[in-house]
Image (spheres, helix red, strand yellow):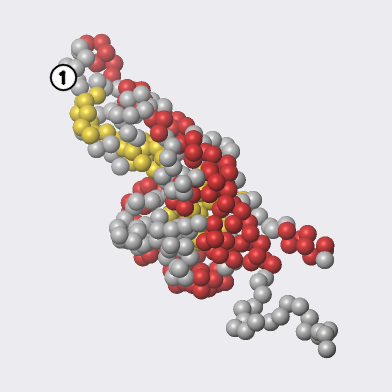
Amino acid sequence: MATTIVPMLEDRPLEIAGRTFRSRLILGTGKYRNNEEMVRAIEAADVEMVTVAVRRVNLDRKQEEGILYHLDPARIFLLPNTAGCYTADEAIRYARLGRAAGLNDWVKLEVIGDQRTLLPDVAATIEAAKVLVSEGFKVMAYTNDDLITALRLEDAGCVAVMPLASPIGSGLGLVNPYFIREIKSRLSCPVLVDAGVGTASDACLTMEQGVDGILMNTAVAEAADAVAMARAMRLAIEAGRLAYRAGRMPRREIAVPSSPTGGMLG
Amino acid sequence: MSKTHEQAVPVSDALEQSITVNGEARSFAGGSVADLLRNLGLHPRLIVVEHNRSILDREQFETTPVQSGDVFELVHFVGGG
């Protein structure tokens, strides 16, 4: 027994573009009540990678609103995103600005196609991915739960493909486990679910589909206690990952007794 | 350019340059991009500068003159998902 349990507990680390991450959780840094809460949530979640956005400096206010005043890039990997971009050109421009900050050449590519649902413009995402890959970027691409788009993004050279669980900030959880499983089984690059997780059970269920990790923001930042939820997410992701690797029992439509049927009194 | 300014002309005179910074019209007394950042109280290490739609390397901040009509985008990292 012990010989199988020990290797099972030792998962190999998440590897993206040759870089390894102990944690399979990536946290967004937006929408926290204040920077102190954000920093404490990152610590409670025990993550090694967080996303950041590129925005204009507010010239009328102190520049302390910049995230580099609160996070040390030597201790945590900062993944610049292109959130809020609606065209390939705009996303490429933001990606280049993010890289010019001089931290790394990674980008979480996001090209939005619709304001109400924030669903991705997949054609523009593929177009932008091709350009950015040709410029040497390591592209992690946010996309919908569509297998064909996921395959095209992998073909374009993305280092990770990131299908949504449900719309950004919706907290609706994993609406299509089947498509997520199919995407994971068909791609060779890491598949990380990005957006839509609402609470720990959503994260656990998502990891049970076999994906390599989850990126989330609102579920933690908007929880009544963000720091506690960050910790819950960390545990849920660990549990879901281990349950996936352990291999769940089959679903049956009828009961099967757990106690012996023989040996009953006459 | 900045030399002439310092020697001869009182500040706020003709050499004030009209530039656009983050979408706002501003006037600038003249100098380099590094001077502009200092003037705005920004730490160059934490800022990325887009100058007339081209990204400027940090090493170019001191040597790039600000000229009338220039359009700057000064960006940094903020919280985001």
Question: Looking at the image, which residue is at 67% across and 70% down?
Answer: A247
Question: In this rendering, is residue A258 above or below B57?
Answer: below
Question: Looking at the image, which residue is at 57% across and 68% down?
Answer: A209
Whether residue A183 is visible: no
Q: Position of residue A134 (x, y in %)?
A: 45, 56
Would you say A25 lies left or right of A217 here? right
Question: Looking at the image, which residue is at 21% across and 14% down?
Answer: B11
Whether residue A175 is visible: yes
Q: How many marks?
A: 1
For this orientation, the residue located farthest to the front is A266
Q: Position of residue A27 (x, y in %)?
A: 51, 49
Mark 1 is surrounded, within 10 Å at the Cα level, by few (under 14), some (14 to 19) or many (20 or more) other residues, namely few
For this orientation, the residue located farthest to the left is B14
| Local SS, label 1 | loop
Q: Position of residue A197 (x, y in %)?
A: 48, 58
- The residue lying toward the viewer, choosing from A41 and A126, is A41
Question: Looking at the image, which residue is at 32% across and 22% down?
Answer: B39
Would you say A167 lies left or right of A259 here? left
- Quadrant of the image containing the N terminus of chain B: top left
Question: Which of the 4 quarters of the picture holds residue A149?
Answer: bottom left
The subunit letter for the residue under badge 1 reads: B
Mark 1: which amino acid? Answer: Ala
- The residue lying toward the viewer, choosing from A237 and A28, is A237
The residue carrying mark 1 is B14
Would you say B25 lies left or right of A193 here? left
